[in-house]
Amino acid sequence: MGPSDGAGAQGKITDVPGVRVGQEQKSDGGWLSGVTVVLPPAGTVGSVDVRGGGPGTHETDALDPTTLVPTVDAVVLTGGSAYGLVTAHGAQRWCEEQGRGFAVTGGVVPIVPAAAIFDLGRGGDFSARPDEAMGYAATAAAGAQAEGHDVERGNVGAGTGAVIGRGQYKGGVGTASLTLVDISDGGPIVVGAVAVVNALGLPLVPELPGEPGTPERRASAVGTGPGPALNTTLVVVATNAVLDVAECKRTASAAHAGLARALNPSHTLADGDTVFCLATGSQELDRSTETARQKSLMTLQSAAADVVRLAILDGVSSAQAVTTPAGEFGAYPGNVR
């Protein structure tokens, strides 16, 4: 019932067949921001769970299990706070040009939910934030990627201006995957995640040397330095399993446990913590009996929490120090993996 590691040291969201990631960013001339777009195969089912008290989101209501359209054409993660949500329009325009979307009379309507982190002014210019053109470019970059491509980590995409611990340290983009080998007769179930880590809290780190034999973890202190407590961790979880919208919703909910295991505190009034779940539907879960169905879903959802934790810690450890007119954001010290 246990997972095995995906490709590479800890895998990547693009280990899920058909999933691609595109990123655009700018880090000069007053800029420190960008966009990350997850582009799944056509027909991918999706949902979302928003837990943070300060979210900046677009089209998330459309992913509720009780709504009309079950599929998602792209997910946009962006800097720029609420201003940056305009990047979804660029992603939508690209999808329309490709004929991707919900078919209606005269054309298609792409379903493109988005979520934003607060990074305004971190490059020195408050008005330097992602726009529709950057959203289009990131989506086009995703569409041009080869199957199973590498995903850049750290100071890229929506993680370009990300920080953690009230701006004490640099945050960034991280990714991971796990492979489950015993919940489907058709082949392995892959669960991957990409995270943009821009959190109020700091990573949960292992117990100090000399304190072995205990499963507890010591929480790093929350930063108390100056700066706005406007923070968010954004995550996209993807799997090749067949899930309906309600099962995607439950998987997104379960995946939030990984966020809480990686960062302390999480889901605060000052965080916009949001997890999307995408199911490409190429592998059936074992649903031969009710017991098998429950085991399959619980195993997958447990793996989703594990992979989110890995992706978040990867984002912290991959981030590099930055100095801008707005200040210095150092790399987080020590090994958080």
Image (cartoon, helix red, strand yellow):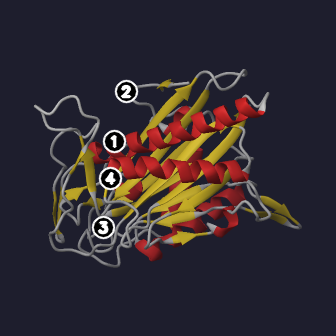
The residue at 28%/73% (across/down) is 229
Say which residue label 4 marks: 263
Contact flag, marks 3 and 1 (Cβ < 8 Å): no
Say which residue label 1 marks: 314
Q: Position of residue 170 (x, y in %)?
A: 24, 55
Q: Secondary structure at mark 4?
A: strand
Question: Which residue type does callout 3 highlight?
Answer: Trp
Question: Which residue type does callout 4 highlight?
Answer: Leu
Quadrant location, the N terminus: top right
Q: Position of residue 267 (x, y in %)?
A: 41, 63
Q: Secondary structure at mark 2?
A: loop
Q: Nearer the viewer, mark 2 or mark 3?
A: 2
Q: Compare marks 4 and 1 and give the one earlier in the sequence.
A: 4
Q: Position of residue 265 (x, y in %)?
A: 31, 60
The residue at 62%/51% (across/down) is 250
- Residue extending farthest to the left is 210
Quadrant location, the C terminus: top left
Number of residues whose C-alpha sits closer than 10 Å to that of mark 3, classed few (under 14), some (14–19) or many (20 or more): many
Question: Which residue type does callout 2 highlight?
Answer: Ala
Residue 101 falls in image quadrant: bottom right
Q: Nearer the viewer, residue 323 or 10?
A: 10
Number of residues whose C-alpha sits closer than 10 Å to that of mark 4, classed few (under 14), some (14–19) or many (20 or more): many
Q: Compare marks 2 and 3 and give the one earlier in the sequence.
A: 2
Asked if residue 79 shows in the view, the reply is yes
Q: Nearer the viewer, mark 4 or mark 1?
A: 4
Q: Compare marks 2 and 4 and give the one earlier in the sequence.
A: 2
Say which residue label 2 marks: 9
Q: Compare marks 3 and 4 and give the one earlier in the sequence.
A: 3
Q: Compare marks 3 and 1 and give the one earlier in the sequence.
A: 3
Mark 2 and mark 4: Cα distance apart in space:
21 Å
Is residue 160 found left or right of 297 in the rendered image? left
Question: Which residue type does callout 1 highlight?
Answer: Asp
